[in-house]
Image: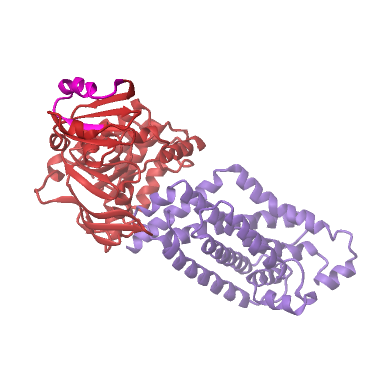
């Protein structure tokens, strides 16, 4: 039986990935979008005096400061793809085809979440190369890289699951967009993804310090900017991912329906 | 793994072996009773037809039998497994062909089969997949994206998917809805073909009388969530050994006159005229007409004994009337196909 679940999961996940990467436009935009972030947002401080940057960002290379934050922010939105593909499967009836095989609803849920996370992960190499071209230097220690990749993966998985859980019973095309705006905006700004926490008001700092985006941005930043790396955020992110996967699986088992 | 089972293996192993058994199944949606105490038995290896107008409960029966929705009361077994207690075993033993043709258009035919194999947890499926593609004449196009397939090819591939895991029962919900007459006939041949070749039991729903007559060895007529009659097509036809005359009138007739007429078995008013059950329409029609105000006769329809007359007799309405109304499901199916 476990073997069956594994087979079903790998089949569904492969399908998600195949469908994504057969569409060249999806790849192009996935690649261009974070690059634009870096170019536009990064350039907005281009003529800021060095002393201001050092004081505000604690580094003169604000792109190095920004990169881990932007990557974390984009993992925040990837969940939208999973829920859109779920809604598409429901509307075109393909979900019914899946449900008429011995596949558990939880398996479908986990495959969709993993699918959108994988889709988000492809931005990492693109962004790293882009940042390198903007003059950011990176550590060579593979352990740091693995840690960073895992942090982003957990963040993506957690938010994908949260996203999918919120839209699990929906068949409306518009829902993922609405939920995306609802989740993304507050969590992006109430985190250290774009600005250091030091200048936040107390209430925002409170949100920021439990916001998974902050954990991922902080860990990524300590890796990119160098210095001592505190691995605690990675633990929090793993807990966040597992918790969301679990909650989402339970919700999917209960509420994922074809009509 | 061999593809073709010899028919003796599966067809009528013994008389008590039934592919599907439903006992007292009731399903309600709020106040609406979709299925009302339905009993149904489908013998193994047969093509069984559920015939009824839209909204009669045919699709609900399929949903209950495939464990997509739970019944409120009653018991159902598919290929020996209880749909409530063993839904996974049921789903491992059934195939499904949708009314609207549901495939993943972004994947090729082979990839669609591959995914089905993954979902059904099949280890050795390639050979059978190839054989099925050859059987359905799709082998040359196996690496083409399904989005580029014609409707007929899509339908064939869907049946191949349904057969891949060697199911005991295949459910076909309105398999020929929205298809042109040529494709429909091709599909009829395929359905009888796979039933013979693979020994698989087929439960299909239809609201086309001629489809049920051409394909099914057993039929159940369903109306308002109730099974109103079951039997072979010829058994059902012999039940109503009479012609049915429907006369459209622009005034209200007095049916008692006709009830007393010799050769008239039954007479009833309809929405815009009357309906008579008679022994021999060609003999009695002149007499009937002479008793009517001839300028008030709008139209006359005579049906010789057929499944249509059985249906009219049992439900008081004609199945083909459905075709004149806007069929929303057909409309959506067409729309969905057009979107591709």
* Display coloring: by chain
Which chain is drawn using purple? A
Q: Tell me the quarter of the image containing the N terminus of chain A.
A: bottom left
Total numbered labels placed on residues in the image: 0
Residue sitting at x 45%, y 40%: B332
Residue sitting at x 62%, y 65%: A145
Residue sitting at x 48%, y 48%: A91
Q: In the drawing, does residue B138 fall left or right of residue B336? A: left
Q: In the drawing, does residue A105 fall left or right of residue B304? A: right
Q: In the drawing, does residue B77 fall left or right of residue B103? A: left
- Above or below, A127 against A200 in this view is above
Asked whether A202 or B329 is in front, the reply is B329
Residue B277 is inside the magenta segment:
yes
Asked whether B89 or B26 is in front, the reply is B26
Is residue B50 visible in this depiction of the protein? Answer: no
Magenta span covers which residues?
A: B275-294
Tell me which corner region of the image, top left, top right, bottom left or bottom right, holds residue B272. top left
Q: Colour of chain B?
A: red
Looking at the picture, how far across and down is residue B336, in whole percent? 47, 39
- Above or below, B47 against B247 in this view is below
Residue sitting at x 39%, y 56%: A8
Asked whether B232 or B102 is in front, the reply is B232
Q: In the drawing, does residue B332 fall left or right of residue A117? A: left
Looking at the picture, how far across and down is residue A53, in whole percent? 85, 68
Residue B133 is inside the magenta segment:
no
- Above or below, B303 against B126 in this view is above
Is residue B330 visible in this depiction of the protein? Answer: yes
Looking at the picture, how far across and down is residue A60, in whole percent? 83, 67
Looking at the picture, how far across and down is residue A94, in whole percent? 43, 48
């Amino acid at each position: 039986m476990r073997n069956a679940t594994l087979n079903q999961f790998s089949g569904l996940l492969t399908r998600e990935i195949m469908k994504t990467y057969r569409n060249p436009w999806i790849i192009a935009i996935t690649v261009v979008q974070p690059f634009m972030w870096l170019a536009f947002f990064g350039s907005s401080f281009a003529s800021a005096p060095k002393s201001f940057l050092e004081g505000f960002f604690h580094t003169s290379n604000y792109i190095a400061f920004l990169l881990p934050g932007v990557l974390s922010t984009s993992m925040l939105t990837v969940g939208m793809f999973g829920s859109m593909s779920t809604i598409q499967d429901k509307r075109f009836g393909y979900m019914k085809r899946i449900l008429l095989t011995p596949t558990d609803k939880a398996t479908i849920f986990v495959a969709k979440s993993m699918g959108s996370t994988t889709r988000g992960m492809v931005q990492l190499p693109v962004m790293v190369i882009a940042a390198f071209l903007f003059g950011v230097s990176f550590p060579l220690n593979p352990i740091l890289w693995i840690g960073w990749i895992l942090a982003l993966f957990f963040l993506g998985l957690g938010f994908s699951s949260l996203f999918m859980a919120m839209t699990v019973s929906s068949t409306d095309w518009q829902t993922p967009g609405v939920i995306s705006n609802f989740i993304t905006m507050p969590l992006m700004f109430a985190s250290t993804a774009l600005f250091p926490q030091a200048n936040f008001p107390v209430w925002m700092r409170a949100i920021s310090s439990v916001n998974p985006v902050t954990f991922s941005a902080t860990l990524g930043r300590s890796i990119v900017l160098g210095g001592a790396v505190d691995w605690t955020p990675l633990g929090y992110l793993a807990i966040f991912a597992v918790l969301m996967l679990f909650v989402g699986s339970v919700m999917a088992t209960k509420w994922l329906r074809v009509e | 793994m061999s593809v073709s089972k010899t028919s003796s293996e599966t067809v009528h192993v013994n008389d008590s072996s039934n592919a599907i058994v439903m006992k007292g199944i009731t399903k309600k949606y709020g106040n609406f009773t979709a299925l009302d105490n339905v009993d149904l038995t489908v013998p193994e290896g047969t093509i069984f037809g559920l015939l009824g107008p839209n909204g009669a409960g045919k699709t609900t029966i399929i949903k209950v039998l495939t464990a997509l929705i739970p019944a409120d009361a009653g018991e159902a077994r598919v290929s020996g497994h209880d749909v409530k207690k063993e839904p996974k075993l049921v789903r491992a033993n059934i195939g499904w062909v949708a009314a609207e043709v549901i495939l993943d258009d972004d994947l090729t035919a082979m990839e669609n089969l591959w995914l089905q194999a993954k979902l059904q947890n099949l280890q050795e499926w390639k050979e059978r997949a190839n054989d099925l593609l050859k059987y359905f004449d799709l082998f040359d196009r196996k690496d083409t994206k399904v989005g580029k397939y014609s409707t007929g090819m899509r339908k064939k591939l869907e049946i191949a998917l349904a057969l891949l895991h060697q199911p005991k029962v295949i459910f076909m919900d309105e398999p020929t809805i929205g298809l042109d007459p040529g494709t429909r006939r091709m599909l009829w041949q395929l359905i009888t073909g796979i039933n013979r070749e693979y020994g698989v039991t087929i439960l299909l729903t239809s609201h086309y009388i001629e489809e049920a007559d051409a394909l099914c060895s057993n039929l159940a007529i369903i109306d308002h969530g109730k099974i109103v009659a079951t039997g072979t097509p010829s058994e059902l036809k012999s039940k109503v050994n009479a012609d049915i005359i429907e006369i459209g009138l622009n005034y209200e007739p007095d049916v008692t006159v006709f009830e007393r007429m010799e050769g008239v078995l039954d007479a009833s008013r309809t929405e815009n005229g009357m309906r008579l059950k008679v022994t021999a329409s060609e003999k009695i029609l002149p007499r009937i007409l002479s008793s009517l105000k001839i300028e008030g006769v709008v139209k006359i329809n005579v049906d010789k004994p057929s499944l249509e007359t059985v249906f009219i007799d049992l439900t008081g309405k004609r199945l083909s009337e459905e075709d004149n109304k806007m069929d929303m499901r057909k409309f959506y199916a067409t729309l969905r196909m057009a979107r591709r």
